[in-house]
Amino acid sequence: RTYIAANAGRVSRAIFEMCMKNGKAGIALKLLRIAKCFDHRFWWFQTPLRHFEGELRDNVFKALESRLLSGGRGHDSFEETLSLLDMTPEEVGQIIRGKKDAGKTVQRMVRLLPRPEVECKVIPITHDVLRFKVTIRPDFNWSGRWHKGAQSYWAWIADTDGTKIHHSEHINFSKKNHPDSIELDIPIPTFSSKPSHYLVYVVSDSWVGVETVYPLSLDLMNFPKRETPYTNLLDLTPLPTTVLEEPRYEGLFSKIETFNPVQSQLFHVLYHTDSPVLLGAPTGSGKTFVAEIALLRMKRLYADGICVYIAPLKSLARERLKEWKAKLGAPPLKWSILELSGDTRHDQRAIEKADVLVCTPEKWDLISRGWKSNLESASGKSNAGGSSKKSFIKRVRLLVIDEIHLLGEERGAVLEAIVSRTRFISQHLEREGVAHAGAEAKTDDGSQLVASAATSASAGASATGASTLPKNELTRIVGLSTAVANPTDLADWMGIDVSSKGPMARRGLYNFRPSIRPVPTTIHVQGYPGKHYCPRMATMNKPCYAAIKEHAPDKPSLIFVASRRQTRLTAFDIISYAAGDLNPKVFLGCDDAYIDAISQTLHDEALQHTIQFGIGLHHAGLSSHDREIVERLYLNGDIRVLVATATLAWGVNLPARLVIVKGTEYYDGKSSRYVDYPLTDVLQMIGRAGRPGFDVEGFAVVMSEISKKDFYKKFLFSPFPVESCLDGRMCENINAEIAIGTVNSVLDVVGYLTWTFYARRVQKNPTYYGAESSSEEHVQDFLLSVAKETLKKLEKEGCIKIGGDVDDVNATVEATSLGSACSNYYLQYRTPKQMQFGIRQARKIILQQIQNEEESGRYSKSGIGLNVAVPLQRSLRFDEISSAWLLYALSSTHEFDELPVRHNEEIMNEELSDSLMWGPDTSSLLSGQERTYVNPEVYEDPHTKCFLLLQAHLEHARLPISDYVNDTKSVTENVPRLLAAMNSIALSDDTTEGAFELVTQFSIARQMLETRTMPSESPLSQIAGIGKELASRLSTKPKHGNGQIHTMRSLREMKRDDCANLIKKLSKGKSSGPLTKTLNSIYNAPLVTVKSSKVTFTSQKGATEDRGTVDVELEINRQGGGGGGGGSGNKKNRQQQQKDGDDGGYSIALILGTIHNRLLLSYSSFQAPRGGTVQVKKALDFDWAAANEGGGEGGGAMILRVVVEGVRGLDSEMLVPLQ
C-alpha cells in the first residue's frame, strides 16, 4: 500500500506528459486530476477547500459536498465553490450550518484558491492560421503559507471533443509579479475542415479541482482571402553596369561586371521611372544595390535632393553609414552622408548640406514632425513654436526603408507613421507647388487635405484613391523586405497602383519567392524535449558540434543563442567536444602564437579563453574593442565559429556557410518568462547562411522545443502576412499630428487613418482588428470609433482639448502644452502628465527649502550685485535635494517601464543602493535622516533600477555586472531628451511660485549629467586630468596671496600659460592625463561676461498686459575645441567637428525671474559659438506687472541668471533694476 501511494502520483504524471506530447486532451486532463488526487488524498469532484483541512472543520466539507443542499445542487465543483463569494457571509453560514463568522472564514479561504481568470481572443492571420491571444490573470489573494513562491499551471488549446491538443504551455505565476497577468500569443494552423469551437484549458499543476475552461466559437469568424503573392523571376540576360550611362556611377560597381537577376529585372523601374518600389526578396539578393540604383536616379534628376535611408537598428545604420561613406562619400561623388540616431548630434548646417541621411525610424519620425512649421516659414509666417528650421524636409526626394516587413513588429507603428506622413507631405507639396513653382504655401489646409481623403476615399485598398492622386508623388518610396504574404496591401499603402489593369498595373511591386536566393540554403528543423529551458539548451550543444562537423568543418559557422550566458556555455561545450575528438583547435584558422597575442589584448575573460580555440563570442556586453577584433578575426577566417546573441542577425553583416539557431526562445524580463522569437527574427538569422561569392550552398539548423518543431517546419516556408501595429501607438501618432496641425477635428483623425496601412488591413482582415466586417460602412464606423476612443484617452491625459462633444465629427481638437511636449520630445502619451506631477512636487520642495534657508539666515539676496554679474551661489543641500528629486521624478515615468530587471538583479540593486549617496528614493535625503528600512520589493521595480543607475553614473560607481553597463547607456541616452521635455513643461507653467528656481535647477541638473559630477563634488573635478586630490589643492592654494581658487571661473579667467604653470606646480607629477588635454578642457568652456543690460517698457493700446524687455549684451569667449594654442592638432580637431556636423558647443541659458515668489519672467537658450570672442545680443520679453509685483523695494528689480549648461562653475547672476 505504501509503495503504491508513493509512486501512483509519479506514474500518473509520467503518463500525463506522454499524453500531452501525443495531443490527447481528454486523457491528459483525467491523468493530471488523478495525479493531484494521489498527492493530496481527495477526489477532484470533492470541494477544493479540502486543501485547507487545518483551517476548516470536516463538517464544513461535508456540508458543501452534500447533494441535498440548494434544491439538490451542491457546491462540489470549482466554479460552484467560487460562487460562495456571491453570497453574504450569513448565507454561507447557513449552507455549512455554522455561524456568520464561519461564513467569513469560508469566503476568506475561497479567495485563497489559486483561480486563473482566462480571457482569449482568436484572430485570423491567414485563411489557414489562427492566432490565439490568451490572457491569464491570477485572481486570488496570495499567501506565502499556501502558495509559497510560485504557482504552476498547464495551459492548452484543444478541440471540443478532446481528441487533439493544438498547443500546450507550462506557465508560472510568482509572488514577485503577482497580480500581473501572463499573455500568450499562439499561432495555430487550421485545416480545410475547421472546428466550430475550441476549448482553452488552464489547470493548476498542484491544486485539486482548480481548473478553468474557456470556450471559443469560430462561427462569426471572417477569414481573409487566399492570395497568390509571388512575382516570377524572369529569365533575363544580366545587365552590365554600363547601363548606368554615367562613368562616375559605373565606378561604384567596379567589383561586379553585371547586375544579378533581381537587380536586372528591377533596373528599368528603378533607374528610368520615379514609381515607388516594394521589393520582397530573400537575404543575399542584392537589395542594397537596388537602393543605390534608386539613389543614383534621384541625384541625377535632383542635384540638391536628399535621400533618407531608414535602418531598423542603430547597428544597421552604422554599417550602412560606414559602407556609404567609403563608397559615396569618397571621390568622385563626394556626397555628404550623415547618420541621425540617438547617438549622434549634428548642427543644422550639416544636415542642410547632406545628400544622404541614414536614420533610425524613431529619429526620422521625430524630425519629420516639423514639416508643417517649415512650410509656415516658407509662406511668410513666423515659427512661433520656436522649433528648429527643417527646410531640408521638403528636399527629400527618396525615402528608402530597409526591412519594411518589420512593420508587423512592435516598432512597426513608427514605420507606418513615417510612410503615411511622407505620402501626405508629398501630396501637400504637389498641390501647393512649393517645391516646383515656389508658390506661396497655404498653411491652413493641411487638415482639409486629410478630410478630403476621408470623404473621397474608402478606408480600404482604395483609401488613397489612385485615380485622384498624382501619377508619381514628389517623394519616391522604396521598401526593401523579405518575401511577404500580403504585398498588395503594402504596395497600395506605399502608393503603387495595384487596382488598375494593363501594362502599367502593379509596376514597382516585386515579391520574389524565398527560393530565388543566389546561394540556395538547406534548412533542417530539429526538436528537443525538456520542460526547463537551461537543461534543454545544454542538450543542444552536442548536436551543434555535430552539425558544424557535418556541414562546415572548415568553413565559417554562426550560432545564435538567446543570452550572453548561453554564448559562454555553448562555446565551452563545443571546445570540450572538440577536445574529446583529440583536436581542440579544429576551428582555429591561424597560428597559435598569433591568436595568443590577440587574446592578450581582449578584456573579456571568457572570450580570451574561447578565441584560442577558434571560437569567438559576440554580444552587447563586450567592449567595442573586443567586438571589432572578433568581427575582424571571423571575417578573415582566423576563427571559424562565432557564438552570438540574436541581435547580431540584424546588426553587423557576418554571413556564414552554416547558421545554427540554438533555441527559438528568449527570456522576456518584462513578463519574467521565456517567449518565442518573432518569426521574422528566425528568418533573419537563417538568412545569414550562404555567402554570395564564396559559397555555392548554405545550411541552417533550427533547434526548437519538440512541440514547436512542426510549427517551424510549416511557417518558415510560408510567411505570415504583415499586420499593422499602429494600434499600440495610436495615441502617440494621433497626438503628434494634432500637435503639428495636420489634424484639427474628429473628422480629420478619421481622414488621417485612411492614409495608414492600418486602414487597409482593417478592410482585408476585419476580425483581426475588431471590425464587424469588411464592408465600407463597417470599416468607416470602426475607424470613427477608434478615433473617438483615442481622443478620449489623450484628453484624459491632458494632451489635447476637445472643443465640443467628441461624438460630433466636426468637434475641434487642439494640443495642450503636454501634448506638444509629447510630440516634440517623443514621449509616451501618459508620460507628460507624470512629468507635470513631478514638476509640481519639485516646485513645492524648492519653495520649502528656500523658506528653510531664509529662516535660518543661510540665504540672502544681498550678495547679488546690481547690474554687476557675480558667480551664482546656491547651497549644497538646495542643489542636492532639487537635483535628486528631478532625477527621481524622471526615473519614475513610463519611459522606463520596460527597463529589464533580470533574475536576481533585485539583490544586486539592493547592494548597489547601499553604496550610493541617495539610495533607492529621495525619502532619506528629503527628511535629512539616515536611511530607514525599505521594502525589498522596491528593488524589483525598473524605475528604482533606473534611479540607481543614474546615481552610479554620476558617482562613477562600480557596477555589479556588464549588463548594468549597457543598461546605464540605455538610460543615459534618453535622460537628456526627457529632461528637456520636463523643462519644456515647466516653462509652460511659468506663472506659479518657484518656477524661476525650478527652471534654473533643470540647467544645474544638465550640468551634473554632462560633467558626471555630484553637487557635493568640487566643480574642478570635472576638468580632464584633475582628480580629487589635485582639485582639493587647487581650491585651497592662495592665488598670489589674494584669496583662494574655489571655482572653475577662477581658472578660466587666468591666462593659459599661468594656468599651465599652476597645474604643473601643484600636480607634482600626479596628474591623471596630459596637460594639453587638461587645458583644453578648461579653455574650451565658454566664459560668458554680461557687458550691459537695459530695461524698456512697452504699453500698447488694446493689449491685455503691459510688457517689458531686457536687452542683454553678452561677450562669450571660447578658445575652440582644442584650446587657444592654435596648433595643428587643434585645427584638425575643429575641422573634424565641422566635417562630422557636430555642434561641438555648450548651451547658454538666460533665465529672468522675480525676487519674491520666484516667478519665471523669461527664458532663452542658445548655442555658444565654436571659438573666439563673440558679442551676442538677446532680448528677453517679460510681464511688466508681474515683475513689479515681485520686484521688492526701491523701485524693484529682477534677477538675471546666465547658466552655462555642460560645465559647472561658470554661472553668474545679477540684479536688473526695473527703471
Image: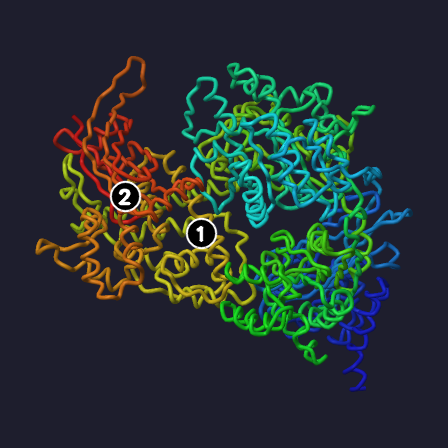
Res 286 seen here: yes
**Colour convention of the picture:** rainbow
Q: Which residue is mark 2?
A: 1119
Q: Earlier in the sequence, mark 1 or mark 2?
A: 1
Count of picture labels: 2
Residue at the location (71% across, 56% down)? 83
Q: Amino acid at mark 1?
A: Thr
Q: Secondary structure at mark 2?
A: loop
Residue at the location (47% across, 17% down)? 379
Query: Which corner quadrant holds the N terminus?
Result: bottom right
Q: Residue furthest top?
A: 1101
Q: Which residue is mark 1?
A: 972
Tag 2: Cα neighbours inside 10 Å, few (<14), some, or many (≥20)?
many
Kindly indicate the quadrant of the structure image that contains residue 837.
top left
Foreground of the two, 711 or 504:
504
Q: CA distance from mark 1 to mark 2?
A: 28 Å
Whether residue 521 sits left or right of residue 585 in the image: it is right
Query: Which corner quadrant holds the C terminus?
Result: top left
Foreground of the two, 571 or 771:
571
Kindly indicate the quadrant of the structure image that contains residue 586.
bottom right
**Residue 857 sits above or below residue 424 on the image:** below
Whether residue 760 sits left or right of residue 857 in the image: it is right
Q: Residue furthest left?
A: 1041
Q: Amino acid at mark 2?
A: Gln
Residue 937 is marked as none
Whether residue 1001 sits left or right of residue 117 in the image: it is left
Q: Residue furthest right?
A: 193
**Residue 185 sits above or below residue 774 on the image:** below
What x and y, as percent, mark residue 954? Answer: 37, 57
Foreground of the two, 1128 or 565:
1128
Q: Secondary structure at mark 1?
A: helix
What x and y, as percent, mark residue 1064? Answer: 21, 60
